[in-house]
Amino acid sequence: MARHWRAGAAGLAVLGLTLTACGGAKVGDSSSAGSGSSGKCGTFNLAVNPWVGYEADAAVVAYVAQHNLGCTVSKKNLKEEIAWQGFGSGEVDAVLENWGHADLVKKYISGQKTAVDAGPTGNKGIIGWYVPPWLAKAHPDILDWKNLNKYASKFQTSESGGKGQLLDGDPSYVTNDAALVKNLKLDFKVVYAGSETALIQAFRTAEKNKQWVIGYFYEPQWFLSEVPLKKVALPAYKTGCDTDTAKVACDYPVYNLNKVVSAKFAKSGSPAYNLVKNFSWTNDDQNEVAKYIAQDKMTDDAAAKKWVEANKDKVDAWIK
Amino acid sequence: MTVAIEKPEQTETAEPAAPVKAARRISRPMVLGAIVVVWLVLFAVLRGKQTLTLAAADLTDLHRWINDFNDSIGANRNSNPLFLYFFNEIRLVIDNLVTFIQHLISQPSGARPVPEIGWLGVVGIAGYVSWAVGNWRVALLAVAGFTFFGLQGLWQESMDTLSLTLSAVFVALLFAIPIGVWAGLSDRFNRIATPFLDFMQTMPTFVYLAPLTLFFLIGGASATIATVIYAAPPTIRITAHAIRNVSKTTVEAADSLGATRRQSLLKVLLPMSKRTVVMGVNQTIMAALAMVTIAALINAPGLGPVVLQALQSLDVGTAFNAGLAIVVMAIVLDRVTTAAAAREENARNAKHDFAKWRRPLLGAGAAVTAVLIYLSHTYLWAADFPGDGTVGSHIASAADSATNWAQDSLSGLTNTIRDVITNGLLNPFQTLVTDSPWWLVGAVLVALGVVLGGWKSGVTTAVCVGLLVGTGLWSDAMTTLASTLVATVLVMVLGIVFGVWMGRSMMVDRLIRPTLDAAQVMPPFVYLVPFLALFGPTRFTAIVAAIVYGAPVAMKIIADGIRAVPETTVEAATSAGCNTWQIITKVQLPMSRSALTLATNQGLIYVLSMVVVGGLVGAGALGYDVVAGFSRGELYGKGLAAGLAIVLLGVMFDRITQAAARRATA
């Protein structure tokens, strides 16, 4: 009996082979075009920190590195801390958008010397307190911090314990908000939403349902092209006014966002390093690509392609 | 999903004799009432004193010390021989394993633009293996499920996730089964191992992700090891449990026949506990899948990054589509392993006529699978999944419109529910625990431990309270404790309502159960955005997320408990003239008391495992501390301390409820 079955199976196999042998392209016939030559660039390890603006930077740089320089780009989705840690072990070559991060600079650039600064990205990072546009329109005076106490009771929520609620987001970002509230004698309580997603959703709901929300936010950010939040003016920033974090009573400085690369990568002579070093664009550029990704739901590659093809002159300046 | 903490032994030594018990039953509620009254009185007097609060950015010496320690490891990584010759070797082995499987089924391998085995081959293998270890029904399910990944447009991502899961499960079993056998044979080792297992399962993964990348670098190895840490304990526990439960007489019989220790292990203990061990493997697979999105934070490829990236742009549809793939994979693997366990049972009991056909059929199946593998290796149409995933985009847009509808039409209602529960239940309770002096809350907890669980659990509680104070995060721990308990109460309310309903009607059970399975394996990140839209970034949002994850377990356990009440008892009550309400409250619920305590235990542990997710949506406290510690180097020590505090809360809850459960069954 068993032999019978085995014969049947063999017959079936042969039948299957003959039936399918005549149809379909074989692997390796014509698909070798896709792999492309990697040239002298080799592998370029690019960290991708978890926000859409960064994703836009990474999409464009990766696209150019791959198509214009022939690099094999390996994108790695990592938080800032872990990405910087990867400089030392050679697993990360570049971080494209660094927001200050004095602690990491101290640890990896001046301490372990595994990382080096690769110059500004051209993006200006603005941090501050924002309100939804309907609120700024209905009560224009809210855009001055001195009037915040007047409206404090309107910002009450189930979380703020009788005071006004000031919403903070992702703990990755530098924040002095608790000290600011105290030192500016505001009748507010900082509530930690815990993630950028929570913050954006809160602002989105607030604009739609005309709710009172004030929170920590920043530019460049894709969400601002969906809901153009308005920034509240805090006492102006002066150099040194934020040295003692417990006594801060001024606005956040404007951050010149910069690129950071591993020390090894900087010395490697890779064309990808030159690209990273020369890479520079404006907030509007980044917002445009971020919008393709976040709102138009394009893939990173498609978004980058669209922007690169429309901005040949800028790209040429990076790879000259 | 994982049974986080072992079920309390049903056959524990009987507690003290009957008269003592009767006396206790009268007095226990009174003692509890007295404790609460004393607490309230002292709270009124001492409110706001010695509450041990710590601001969000402040650190204690312990936190700073952990930071320095962490930094020194990082700085010495490349010169330390321990790293050069130990961790690096482990990393190499595991990395090679992961890459090998990836080249086989998910990633382009060598010069080939596609993996060695294409979709047709993988579907063939999935079907064949499921049929060989299970039955033809699960084989059909496996084929359908795997084809669905392709239709969703997520073939490669799913295969990456499958590769990582398979490697992690393989590594986990390599260690877990021998350790489990040892723990089953030796009581002493079991006692030593249990706290470590508790630790591995309740310590939030966020806490050890960053150190893991320091030890094992960024890549497959770190992701696999992170998964192994979380996924191995169920197999260890269940294997130990299985070995322990092999009947004593059988082992003695083998001994008296002159079997050596080794023989009795290999020929008696292992074969007889095989079925239960397979259930442990099942739990390990489920736990490994629960890590998919978290491992993505350290660059694990697959479905995880799809979910996380969609979350950055609040794209619910895309996240849901990928989450659904994880759910389908979990359900397929669950049903296949369950069927495999059942087959072990059936094969021993029944000698089918079919059995003699089985071997030749297996041979034929293997041949067909081999053909499919060959085809998928050779031809493009069988290697790359055809089509562009239109089913996936339909699912995504359906999920999008469903969320939009819910946000537009339900937000008034949801806000009311939130405010009622927050103001009526959560705020007063939280004020009570956070504004009382720490020693008062500590004393109350110890007293509750003694009254509910006996002296032993009182001692455990006292140790946990002491260590909680030591973490420097007492106040945050109390805030988290308040939310956790409120969530558990709601979990139990839902658990009893749905559990009783499911327990009384098989049809309801069959309708609801798939939803419960899905709620347990769907990554929480997928439903956070809709919840945020409905409830805003608040503690209540975190509670709702915890309920979605914790309630299914409670419902399943209670349903099983209700079903276990003897039919004859219910019939007797019916003929005595009881109506349905009376049968439920006077007969079925009291008789499934041990199931209720077990459900409370598991509900609590599951709710506690969502604390970190809660930190992402506005719960603050320990969850936020852990998230912040993961994000910022200078807060790392505080994050680790917060993780420890979560473990301590878990151990405390678990020991009290387990001891109480033993009393309930005694």
Image (cartoon, coloured by chain):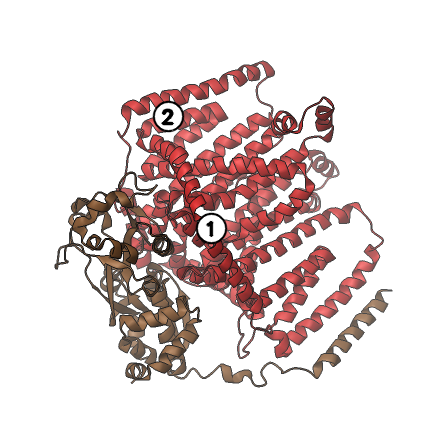
Location of residue B274 with respect to A251 vertically, above or below: above
Question: If the image is split into quadrants, where does the C terminus of chain B sit?
Answer: top right
Q: Earlier in the sequence, mark 2 or mark 1?
A: 1
Please indicate, yes or no, whether residue B96 appears anywhere in the rendered image.
yes
Find residue B443 and name its label.
2
Q: Residue at x 53, y 35 (%)?
A: B493
In the picture provided, is B60 more to the left or to the right than A7? left
Side of B45 where A240 appears, left or right: left
Frontmost residue, B470 versus B448 = B448
Q: CA distance from mark 2 to mark 1?
A: 47 Å
List x then y, in percent, for residue B169: 56, 55
Return the x and y of residue B444 as percentages of the image width and height.
39, 26
Q: Amino acid at mark 1?
A: Ser
Secondary element at tag 2: helix
From the viewer's perspective, is residue A14 above or below residue B445? below
Circle 1 SS class: helix
Q: Identity of the amino acid at label 2?
A: Ala
Chain of residue at mark 2: B
Q: Which chain is brown?
A: A
Q: Position of residue B565 (x, y in %)?
A: 68, 31
Mark 1 burial class by Cα count in 10 Å: few <14, some 14-19, many 20+: few
Give the quarter of the image for residue A222: bottom left
Q: Are marks 2 and 1 on the same chain?
A: yes
Q: How many marks?
A: 2
Chain letter for the part of the structure drawn in red: B
Q: Which disc is residue A37 wearing? A: none
Q: Is residue B160 left or right of residue B314?
A: right
Q: Residue at x 28, y 38 (%)?
A: A162
Query: Where is mark 1, residue-wise?
Result: B409
Please report contact status of discs 2 and 1: CB closer than 8 Å, yes or no.
Answer: no
